[in-house]
Amino acid sequence: MRAMILPVAALLLAGAASLAHPAAAEGLETGGISITRGGGNLNTAAAKGSFAGQAATTIGGTARNGGRVATLGGDNRNFATGRGSTAFQDTTTVGGAAFGPGALANTYGGQNTNNARGAHSLADQSVTTLGGTAFGRGAQSQVSGGYNANLAAGRYSQADQQILTMGGSAIGRGAQDRVYGGNNRNAALARGAQASQQVVTVGGQ
């Protein structure tokens, strides 16, 4: 089971959110509206000596003039599905910034999943969602930590899931900040089963 390093990673990502990343879907500045969609993802391997591995990073853009920013962390998934399985999935979503009266920054951490499903399984999943910034009178920042899941389902199973959701910032008169920590779940379901789940949700500032 990998060490719990998400809080440290989150701080590093927050400082680096504006830098280009080769695996990132990066939002464009478009005046009042910026929408960044992290792709449909998926990644399989589908058995015999299987292995899968996937990393998806989505970084939101910037909107001004009473801006609206939406950052959607992709549909993710990842499998391996049996026999010599393994899987691994890392999903990171970093919200953008909106400025002006009524500014709105919404960050959704992707729909995740991850699998492995039996035989010599392992699965492992890491989901990090960092909220964006909304600045202005009546500003709102909303962060949802993804739908998560993770399994492994039997034989020499193991599963392990780590979820970190950090709220963004809503600054201004009447500003509101909402943080939802994801739907999580995690399993393993028998024979060499083991599961382990760590979920950290940190409110906005």
Image (tube, helix red, strand yellow):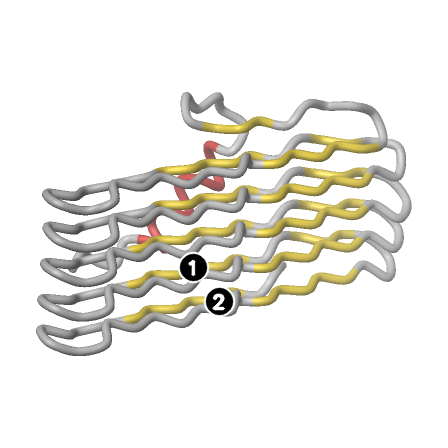
Q: Residues within 10 Å of mark 1 (few under 14, many from 20)?
A: many
To which quarter of the image does residue 25 belong? top right
Q: Nearer the viewer, residue 63 or 122?
A: 122
Q: Is residue 19 above or below residue 145?
A: above
Give the residue type at disc 1: Leu
Q: Nearer the viewer, residue 204 or 190?
A: 190
| Residue drawn at the location 31% of the way across and 63% of the way down | 161
Q: Nearer the viewer, residue 139 or 115?
A: 115
Give the residue type at disc 2: Thr
Mark 1 vs mark 2, CA separation in Å: 6 Å
177 lies left or right of 115? right
23 lies left or right of 81? right
Q: Residue furthest bottom?
A: 190
Q: What's the mark number on residue 201? A: 2
Q: Is residue 102 above or below residue 189?
A: above
51 lies left or right of 145? left
| Residue drawn at the location 78% of the way across and 55% of the way down | 140
Q: Where is the N terminus found, in terms of image quarters?
A: bottom left
Q: Position of residue 164 (x, y in %)?
A: 43, 59
Q: Where is the C terminus found, in terms of image quarters?
A: bottom right
| Residue drawn at the location 61% of the way across and 44% of the way down | 72
Q: Are dots 1 and 2 in contact, CB under 8 Å? A: yes
Q: What's the mark number on residue 199? A: none
Q: Is residue 28 above or below residue 32?
A: above
**Earlier along the polypeptide chain: callout 1 or callout 2?**
1
Element under label 1? strand
Q: Position of residue 38 (x, y in %)?
A: 55, 36
Q: Position of residue 66 (x, y in %)?
A: 88, 39
Residue position marked by numbered label 1 in the rendering: 164
Q: Is residue 120 above or below residue 97?
A: below
Q: Nearer the viewer, residue 182 or 6?
A: 182
